[in-house]
Amino acid sequence: MDAIDFSQLPTDVNVKVGSVIIATGWDIHEPYGEYGYGEFENVITQVQLERMLAPNGPLEGHMRRLSDTKKPKEIIFIQCVGSRETERTYCSGVCCMLALKNGRLLLEEFPDANITICYIDIRTPEKEFEEYYERAKDAEIRMIRGKVGEISEDPETKNVKVRVYRAFFSIIAL
């Protein structure tokens, strides 16, 4: 099951709209070799998740594990991948809000799932964004300030195990 169909041919669509939003975009970071991406089937990027969650996407708005198409029970967002590092010290400025939005969407679809956002710093640059962050915490999305140190996969179940080194030196295994 592919979240993005690269062989899909372009088509022309005429749409009547009331507003136009100019998206300035950003460079997509493909984290091959980082955090099991490209190695473990159930490690995906935010772009792949966005495609899964899109109503017109291949999964018609429903996320599934790539290894077995089951509903996920544990979901972790690893923030600041590809930025906030020696080579790229800047913050992308969009990832935090995207994780908060997608975390809430996933919690609506999977109310019994445990959803965690692992971050260095949560960036919510506008007042409304801070309120959105607070609502995400109220919705029981677990927020862990720290960095992922280790990631491994159970070869039979394809479940991914993540070890997070919290700020202030404690360790959490998820």
Image (cartoon, rainbow, N blue to C red):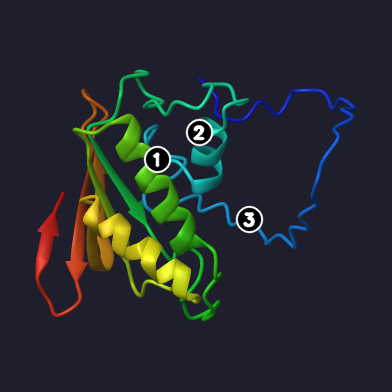
What residue is at 34 percent from the left and 30 percent from the top?
109
Residue 36 position in % (x across, y down) = 37, 46
For residue 28, the mark is 3
User: Image quadrant of residue 110?
Assistant: top left
- Judged from the image, the secondary structure of the residue bearing numbered disc 3 is loop
Relative vertical location of residue 134 with respect to residue 121 in this rendering, above or below: above
* Amino acid type, callout 2: Leu
- Judged from the image, the secondary structure of the residue bearing numbered disc 2 is helix
- Judged from the image, the secondary structure of the residue bearing numbered disc 1 is helix
Local packing at callout 1 (Cα closer than 10 Å; few below 14, some 14-19, many 20+) is some
Looking at the rendered image, the disc whose residue lies closer to the viewer, 1 or 2, is 1
Work out whether mark 1 precedes mark 2 in sequence or the reverse, and give the earlier one.
2
* Amino acid type, callout 1: Leu
For residue 88, the mark is none
Local packing at callout 2 (Cα closer than 10 Å; few below 14, some 14-19, many 20+) is many
Q: Residue at label 2?
A: 53
Relative vertical location of residue 98 with respect to residue 47 in this rendering, above or below: below
Residue 64 position in % (x across, y down) = 39, 25
127 sits left or right of 141 in the view: right
What residue is at 47 percent from the left and 40 percent from the top?
38
Work out whether mark 2 precedes mark 3 in sequence or the reverse, and give the earlier one.
3
User: Image quadrant of residue 113?
Assistant: top left
Q: Nearer the viewer, residue 108 or 143?
A: 108
